[in-house]
Amino acid sequence: MNTSDPNLRPQRINTTALSLGLLAVIAVGAVLKVAQAVVIPLLIAWFLSYLLAPVVTFLVRRLRFPAILAVSCVVVLLLLAAWGGGLVVQQRLLGFAKAFPEYQVRLAGILAQYGDQLSIPASVLKETDWNAQLGPLVLKTSRFFITFISNTILVLIFLVFMLLAKPYANDKLRAAFSPGRAEAFINISNIISRQIGAYLGALFVISFVTGLCVWGALAWLGVEFAFAWGLLAFVLNFIPTIGSIVASIPPVLTALAQHAPDLWPAAATAGVLFAIQQTLGNFIAPKVYGDRLNLSPVVILLFLVFWGWLWGITGALLAVPIAAAIQITLAHIPALAPLAVLMGSGKKYAKKKSPPPPPAA
């Protein structure tokens, strides 16, 4: 190897900087873990502000609405939509809760039956006792809804103040910084807003179509609570990859309990759901997203694992928008721009012809 080329010489690693960077990452992670009760509502409000800010700006700048009136109208419409969706979810959950004991008995009988046929030890079957797991599950669910309600109040408080400042944010940046720096900040904000808004809009369409297809397919197969499982598929489809898998488990178990001991309806349900997820996820979704989200699948998976571990299901929902915002910000910092390139999918670089190799020395 020719070591005279400076590009081929081994580079020294600044261990001090590397250690400080690692400690900084650990410290930030610890702070985010401890302060998640405040940080999560703040992040949710921040992303919602990017989606709702164009409406508020239009009402204030074009229609001359007072800022407080424009924000009030947008927030009230958001609350009405959330309230209507909450009522639908509540009705479906109550219907399933009433029928759950019957399904619980059926599933326990199926488990005991196939346990005897397959000679599964009784100790293993006891670990899957539905009655023993139901109490902790209900407790966890209750805590989740209490946390969700408290977070909603904080989200609304943060969202109102963010939306009130949005129509005049660019004016303040131009007044506070030099023209070049102010325009750079405004450009970053606009790119983040467009990319996250386009991604969330496309994801909403794909999730809505997925929910409709799951609902229609399960109703055609005669699976009970088809609408509830379609609604579950719509919600969990916002979590990349893992959400669609989790959403397929309850309808398969329902079909199994409903038609036991016949296993073919459950197998048909699993096959149909797999076909829907594969068709929408691998063929239609990439064409709808296009280049709206220039992120590597590996980066998405890493962010999904990290934020899901840090904040649970809320972190998994926020993982992709956080990754997109970080990538856009890094792309506008010259020293960190290579990291943004590495976070990308690389499709637009593959289209360019690579330069010919240098002649051999």
Image (cartoon, rainbow, N blue to C red):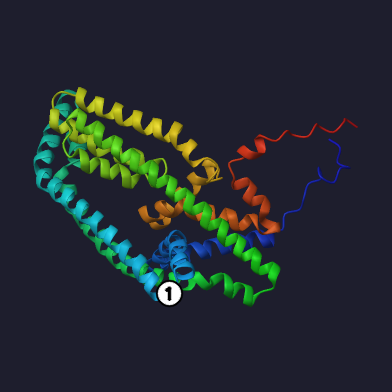
- Residue 324 point in image, percent of width and height: 53, 52
The residue tagged 1 is 67
Is residue 42 left or right of 107 when viewed as pictured? right
Residue pictured at 60% horizontal, 64% vertical: 186
Frontmost residue, 90 versus 28: 90
Residue pictured at 29% horizontal, 63% vertical: 79
- The amino acid type of the residue labelled 1 equals Ala
Look at the numbered disc 1 and give the secondary structure of its residue.
helix
Is residue 120 at least partly visible in the picture? no
- Residue 60 point in image, percent of width and height: 45, 70
User: Residue 256 appears in which quarter of the rendering?
Assistant: top left
Q: Residues within 10 Å of mark 1 (few under 14, many from 20)?
A: some
- Residue 247 point in image, percent of width and height: 30, 40
Frontmost residue, 135 versus 227: 227
In the picture shown, does residue 279 fall above or below 242? above
Farthest front residue in view: 63
Is residue 202 left or right of 26 when viewed as pictured? left
Quarter of the figure that contains the C terminus? top right
Frontmost residue, 91 versus 360: 91
- Residue 230 point in image, percent of width and height: 26, 40
Is residue 124 left or right of 39 when viewed as pictured? left
User: Residue 140 appears in which quarter of the rendering?
Assistant: bottom left
